[in-house]
Image: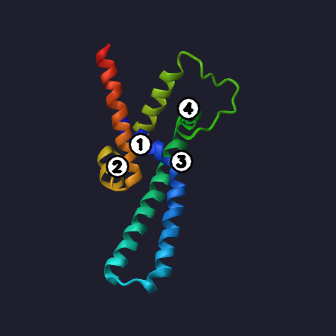
Amino acid sequence: MEKYGKTILSAYPLLDGYITEIEGLIKKRARNSFYLRCDTVAFAEQLIRLGEIRKDLFELKFIVEEVLASLNSYDRTLISYKYFGVRPEDENFDLSSRNYFRKQIKALDNFCKRLESMGYVQEWFQTKYLKIAFISSIYKTTLLEEGKKHVRENYY
């Protein structure tokens, strides 16, 4: 359950950059389409696919923001620190606390439960977003990390 949640949170800081890149790519290809010597229909389908990916990334960004807004402020702070690199301004935020990692796991679990309660389940994620290359690579990295963690837990 947590693997796709981790992937979504890891991809979130990159979404704006990829959306901007895709917008620029669509504009550049459309401007230079006069010089192409290929099938017009195939070219138009490429532009449509890029537009759909851009729309999907916008949707993912909106979903993450909506789920984060529904979490309590402490969970939001923990997730922002771990996945987005946002240092908390609260001086009571203790990174060296023994409970920090347990709270981090609980915050991720709360995020994933909110995703599921809003109807965004693992199957939805896999069918809609694993076709996008950078999200697929983040997902594979997350699976590898989880596999190593599983091996470590069973070894000791």
Q: Is residue 28 left or right of residue 127?
A: right
Asked if marks 3 and 1 touch (Cβ < 8 Å), the reply is no
At x 64%, y 34%, the residue is 87
Q: Which residue is mark 2?
A: 125
* Three-letter amino acid code of the residue under disc 4: Leu
At x 37%, y 35%, the residue is 2
| Mark sitting earlier along the chain (3/2) | 3
Q: Is residue 37 left or right of residue 60?
A: left
In this view of the protein, which residue sits in the foreground, 4 or 150? 150
Tell me the quarter of the picture where residue 111 sits.
top left
| Residue 38 visible to an observer of this rendering | yes
Q: Which mark is residue 78?
A: 4
Q: Is residue 152 above or below residue 147?
A: above
* Three-letter amino acid code of the residue under disc 1: Thr
Q: Which residue is mark 1?
A: 7
* Three-letter amino acid code of the residue under disc 3: Pro
Camera-side mark, 1 or 2? 1
Asked if marks 1 and 2 touch (Cβ < 8 Å), the reply is yes
